[in-house]
Amino acid sequence: MITLEQVTKVFNQGRHNEVAAVRGVDLTIGDGRVTVLRGPSGSGKTTLLTVIGCLARPTTGRIRIDGEMVSGLPERFLNEVRRRTFGFVFQRFNLIRGLSARDNVMLPAYPTGRPHRALIDQAEGLLDRFGLADRASLSVEHLSGGEAQRVAIARALINDPAVIVADEPTASLDGERVAQFLAIAEDLKRAGKTVLITSHDPRITAAPLVDALVTMADGRIVEASP
Amino acid sequence: MTARRTSRSPRGSTLAAIAVGSLVSLAVGLFAAASNDDPQPRRVRAAELVAALALSDVALFGEARYTRNPSLADLHSAFQDGPASLEHFPTGSLVAAPRAFPAGRLEAGKE
Amino acid sequence: MRAAFERRRHLVDFAVGSLARHPTKNLGLVVTYALVVFLVGSVMLYGSAIRREAAAMLSSGPEITAQAMVMGRHDMSTSADVAALKGLRGVRRIEPRLWGYLWDSAGAANYTLMVPPPSDAAHAVGKGEAIVGEGVARARKLKPGAMLFLVSPSGKFLKTRVKSILSSDSALVSSDLVLVEEADFRAFFELPADVWTDVAITVTNPREVTTVAEKAALKLPRHRFVTRADMSRTAEALFSWREGLTLALLAGALVAFAILAFDKASGLSAEERREIGILKAIGWETGDVIALKLVEGGLVSGVAFLVGVIGAWAHVRFFAAGLFAPVLEGWSTLYPRFPLAPSIDALEIATLAALTVAPFTAAILVPVWRTATADPDAVMR
């Protein structure tokens, strides 16, 4: 369970280009559920996602993950929380160019020190599961958008995190790919993962697997269900 | 899957170890090969000549008295055209003047 | 333990991958780096090899050399001076020497003409004979049995037949020597029979050199006495200036290298920053990222350093520092050709490493630290 209390995030604080992207958000994200943050671009949903995922610290407010307060932790402790808890699927995937799909998937597991052989097997197993077995050795810049996304999902899963965070996962996908993504999300949910998605894509927000829908506007939550 | 694995290039750490290892062994091999010919006999033969002819300096720079025999040059020869004259020979800037006044001379001067 | 090893190995894997992804840049860096190490290393190894060689050879030089001085200039010693030294206690042997410089316009070089002392049977020369050093033979294309003509400053001719050529083993000390017979020498330079260039003194007890020199100085106040210690001090100073000079020239290269290194490191490219952000976002620790960059830098500097040192060593060992020949030889026509045996001295290698590896590492560390400790979100966007 992740709880947010009065979380704000202000960029460029104290300067002329100061922007308050998130303004006083209270939110609870239940375990094993699919939660979607929805809202127009600029509504602060991506910023909120990075704050929840410990990629950025909130300017004020408190965040607890399973009761543990993480919002005040310095960066060197957040590393650990991030690796243990979250798997990220970024909007532009953020794969490392020049590396093969397999190496990209293995990357988050390097600091764990698991044996190389086991990592390869695990990475190839994940790629296989997403229908990318024949793409494992291909450098990621040669992959299509849908393939790259599935590599990114595989990468998010390699450390077996409790929470999968996906930012605008369907922004560049056609209908078939969206269905594929939803199927994967369904799988994750069945496996007991918490899934947190930002999207303004009706194909996602209207999907039956979504348990909670949170609507944001101008940095605030305007509607949350249930 | 097996076929794909065999086609994968070796691990980066293996490559790094091979590169550093081969450089180190090249170095060791070169030093070992070169140490086969011991410079000592050559030095001994040269030292015998030095003793026989009572030589005093190395024959590297023959262009001036004070570069050919710096230890036997008089102390002013580098400035024979005047104490502030610029060094004439390129090697003159490379051969240091004797660091100490020769022993015996100062003592003689005191007495 | 196993996990810690595997974790480091993974870092190295990734570091090698990162380097391989920018082959031109990193290869260029290795080459520049290796070149700097090569140049600085060559100078250091060459200087120390020559000093070691000179010290080994000159260790058997005359224990004391007595030299007459007039008005601060070198003058001839007389037979009377030699006789005065003969009575000194503690002196084993007195050997008056005859040698001098000759500008040879045919060879465009200065020779050192010398009369081998009577005690030296191995290099005894008869009238009209000469033994020449390796450099003289090279400059005049002489072989044993060939004729060597010399012209004195006053226009006198000396016609000699080359008896033998001194071994190139001793070229460092004998390259420009021309050994001739005493009567030939005196006639050539128009010297009276009772003068000598200087006097070599051998003492009975090597520990009494200073005492003997002091006593000799009392007997011959117009002479100065150069001990073997003075000579080896001179030999030690050899190339220390030269090295300094060459190093000063190389300092330019070092500065350029530092700028390059700093630019590479401080100007972390947008892509590198993004990569660091990604790695942190997917769970790498700050320490992992810094270790990664240090491994990258360490591989570049380590490989380049090894290549540079091996290259420098081979340059000195097999090519007698041939690239520096124009600088080293100056105007010396008879610069000796001789093999050098550079030795790898731990202190020298450490100095070299400190001059090159340290600035590089520092230039990497600072910007990476700054990037890696920031929020990944801020770095990635």
Image: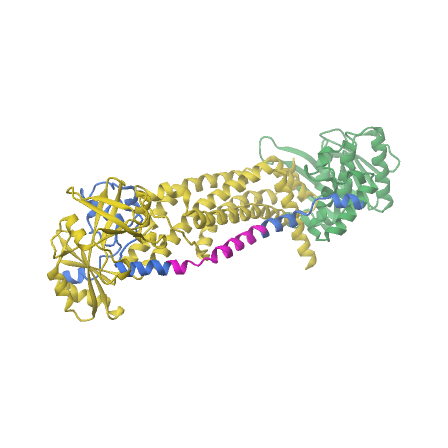
> How has the structure been colored for display?
by chain
Quadrant holding the C terminus of chain C: top right
In the rendered structure, the answer to whether residue C187 lies left or right of residue A198 reads left
Which of the two residues, A178 or B80, is positioned nearer the viewer here?
A: B80
Q: Colour of chain C?
A: yellow
Within the image, what quadrant is residue C20 found in?
top right
Q: Residue furthest right?
A: A208
What is the x, y in percent for residue C23? 60, 38
Residue C222 in view:
yes
Q: Which chain is green?
A: A
Taking the spot 85% from the left edge, 46% from the top edge, the residue there is A191
Vertical arrangement, residue C145 with respect to residue A206, above or below: below
What is the x, y in percent for residue C1? 68, 60
Which of the two residues, C126 or C52, is positioned nearer the viewer here?
A: C126
Question: How many discs mark residues in the rendered view?
Answer: 0
Taking the spot 72% from the left edge, 48% from the top edge, the residue there is A109
What is the x, y in percent for residue A163? 78, 45
- Decide whether the magenta segment is chiefly helix, strand or loop: helix
Q: Which chain is blue?
A: B
Vertical arrangement, residue A70 with respect to residue A210, above or below: below
Q: Indicate whether residue B29 is drawn in magenta.
A: yes
Which of the two residues, B76 or C372, is positioned nearer the viewer here?
A: B76
Residue A73 in view:
no
What is the x, y in percent for residue A152? 75, 39
- Magenta-highlighted residues: B22-42
Q: Residue furthest front?
A: C145
Q: Indicate whether residue C381 is drawn in magenta.
A: no
Taking the spot 40% from the left edge, 50% from the top edge, the residue there is C46
In the rendered structure, the answer to whether residue C279 lies left or right of residue A185 reads left
